[in-house]
């Protein structure tokens, strides 16, 4: 699933030299990193993609810009991977 893949990629990044995984977008795993992501989202004007951890073939994916937009949509998929 997407959450485990993000965790494995993060572990691999720690084992390799800086920049080796620079192709990978900034990622947050929810709900574990929810507060960290909310703090970033509060200050950012960027668009983030939210992918439900249990979804497939694009089912449940949505874009967010801002906390209000995020809060309105995240309740349907509390376990998710978010990328910038």
Image (cartoon, grey):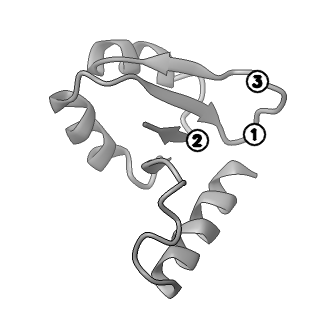
Provide residue 34's location: percent of width, then percent of height.
37, 45
User: Foreground: 80 or 19?
Assistant: 19
Q: Earlier in the sequence, mark 2 or mark 3?
A: 3
Instruction: Sort mark 1 into few (<14), some (14-19) or many (20+) by Cα contacts within 10 Å.
Output: few
Residue 20, placed above or below residue 25 = below
Provide residue 2's location: percent of width, then percent of height.
69, 49
For the point 75% across and 39% down, the residue is 54
Residue linked to disc 1 = 54
For the point 28% across and 21% down, the residue is 67
Residue 77: quarter of image: top right
For the point 53% across and 54% down, the residue is 24
Provide residue 58's location: percent of width, then percent of height.
76, 24
Q: Secondary structure at mark 3?
A: loop
Q: Is residue 13 left or right of residue 66?
A: right
Residue linked to disc 2 = 79
Instruction: Sort mark 2 into few (<14), some (14-19) or many (20+) by Cα contacts within 10 Å.
Output: many
Q: Which quarter of the figure is the C terminus placed in? A: top left
For the point 46% across and 49% down, the residue is 27
User: Foreground: 37 or 49?
Assistant: 49
Count the marks: how many? 3
User: How far is disc 1 from disc 3 in space, using C-alphas?
Assistant: 11 Å
Q: Is residue 47 left or right of residue 56?
A: left
| Residue 58, label in figure | 3
Asked if marks 1 and 2 touch (Cβ < 8 Å), the reply is yes
User: Foreground: 50 or 30?
Assistant: 50
User: Foreground: 23 or 81?
Assistant: 23
Residue that sits furthest to the right in the current view:
57
Provide residue 3's location: percent of width, then percent of height.
63, 54
Residue 5, placed above or below residue 36 = below
User: How far is disc 2 from disc 3 in space, using C-alphas?
Assistant: 15 Å
Asked if marks 2 and 3 touch (Cβ < 8 Å), the reply is no
Q: Secondary structure at mark 1?
A: loop
């Amino acid at each position: 699933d997407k959450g485990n893949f993000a965790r494995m990629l993060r572990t691999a990044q720690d084992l390799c030299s800086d920049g080796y995984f620079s192709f990978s977008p900034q990622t947050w795993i929810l709900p574990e990193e929810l507060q960290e992501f909310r703090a970033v989202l509060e200050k950012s004007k960027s668009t983030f993609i939210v992918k439900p951890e249990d979804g497939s073939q694009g089912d449940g994916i949505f874009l967010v810009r801002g906390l209000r937009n995020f809060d309105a949509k995240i309740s349907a998929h509390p376990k998710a991977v978010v990328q910038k």
